[in-house]
C-alpha cells in the first residue's frame, strides 16, 4: 500500500510540474517536440491526406497572432500546429483544457512536451488563464491557438463561441486568423477511440483585427468569420 501511495504521489507531482505555466525551457524537450512534430506531419499527410489551403495568409513577421478555429476532434490542434514552420513550434501555444489534458501523467506529458499546450482552467481561475493568454500575446513572436467553442462538437457543426475569446481580444491590437477544419470530425469524432483514414483540410483565412469592442460581439464576429470560411470552401 505504501509503495502504491508513493507512486501516486510521484505521478501527481509530475503532473503538477507539467501543468505549471509558463514552463521551464528544456533543450531535450525541444528536440523531442520537433521529432514528434515531423512524425505527426508525416502521418497526417499519409493517413489523413492532410491539405492546407491559405498557408500564405500566415504572418511572416515577428508579431504575435491568434489562430481561431472550429473544434470537432483531437486532430484539430495537431493540424493547426502542422501549418506552422518548425521554428515557431516552441512559441506556439494551443489552449488546452486543464481538467482534461492535465489530469494524468501520460496525457499531461503529451500536452506539455509534444504540443506545448497552455493549460486553461475552464471552471475556476478562468480570468487567470485569460490573463496568461494576454501576456503571451503582448510578447513578440508568439502564436496562440484557440478553439472558442470550448469543447469538441458532438455533431460536427459549429457551436456558439464563448465570450472568453472576446474578453481576451477586447483590449488587444493583435492579428486574428480564422481557420476552418474540414474532415477532422469524420476522421476522429468525439467518443471514438482511434482516428480512421479520412481526408482533412485546413482552411486559413486572411488576418484581421476585431472591430468590435465588447466580449460578446467579438465572439460573434469571430464565429461569423469561421463560418464564412467554411461556406466559401464548400464545407458544411
Image: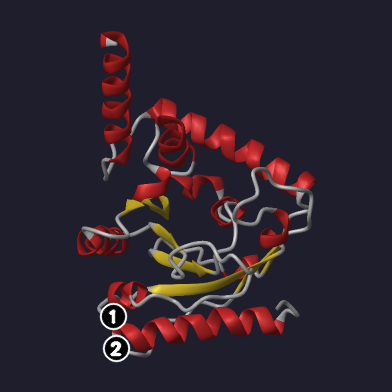
Q: Tell me if 119 is positioned left or right of 78 in this view.
A: left
- Residue position for label 1: 170
In the image, residue 43 above or below residue 55? above
- Residue 118 in picture, x, y percent from top left: 36, 50
Residue at image coords 57%, 57%: 80
Q: Tell me if 187 is positioned left or right of 130 in this view.
A: right
In the image, residue 209 above or below residue 55? below
SS at mark 1 in the image: loop
171 or 5: nearer the eye? 5
Extreme-front residue of the structure: 1
Between marks 2 and 1, how big is the CA–CA gap? 5 Å
80 or 185: nearer the eye? 185
What is the number of the mark on residue 213?
2
Residue at image coords 38%, 63%: 64
Residue at image coords 26%, 45%: 22
User: How was the colour assigned to the protein in this rendering?
Assistant: secondary structure
Q: Within the image, what quadrant is residue 1 found in?
A: top left
Residue at image coords 29%, 29%: 12
Please say whether residue 117 is visible from this viewpoint: no
205 or 121: nearer the eye? 121
Amino acid at each position: 500500500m505504501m509503495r502504491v501511495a508513493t507512486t501516486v504521489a510521484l505521478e501527481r507531482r509530475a503532473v503538477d510540474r507539467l501543468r505549471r505555466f509558463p514552463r521551464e525551457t528544456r533543450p531535450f524537450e525541444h528536440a523531442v517536440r520537433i521529432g514528434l512534430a515531423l512524425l505527426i506531419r508525416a502521418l497526417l499527410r499519409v493517413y489523413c491526406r492532410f491539405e492546407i489551403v491559405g498557408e500564405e495568409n500566415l504572418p511572416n513577421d515577428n508579431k504575435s497572432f491568434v489562430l481561431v478555429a472550429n473544434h470537432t476532434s483531437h486532430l484539430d490542434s495537431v493540424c493547426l500546429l502542422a501549418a506552422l514552420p518548425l521554428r515557431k513550434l516552441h512559441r506556439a501555444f494551443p489552449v488546452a483544457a486543464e481538467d482534461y489534458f492535465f489530469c494524468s501523467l501520460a496525457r499531461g506529458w503529451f500536452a506539455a512536451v509534444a504540443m506545448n499546450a497552455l493549460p486553461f482552467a475552464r471552471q475556476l481561475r478562468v480570468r487567470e488563464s485569460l490573463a496568461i493568454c494576454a501576456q503571451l500575446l503582448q510578447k513578440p513572436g508568439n502564436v496562440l491557438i484557440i478553439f472558442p467553442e470550448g469543447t469538441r462538437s458532438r455533431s460536427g457543426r459549429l457551436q456558439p463561441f464563448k465570450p472568453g475569446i472576446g474578453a481576451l481580444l477586447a483590449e488587444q491590437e493583435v492579428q486574428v486568423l480564422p481557420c476552418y477544419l474540414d474532415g477532422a470530425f469524420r476522421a476522429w469524432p468525439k467518443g471514438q477511440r482511434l482516428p480512421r483514414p479520412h481526408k482533412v483540410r485546413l482552411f486559413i483565412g486572411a488576418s484581421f483585427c476585431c472591430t468590435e469592442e465588447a466580449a460578446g460581439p467579438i465572439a460573434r464576429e469571430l464565429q461569423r468569420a469561421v463560418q464564412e470560411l467554411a461556406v466559401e470552401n464548400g464545407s458544411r
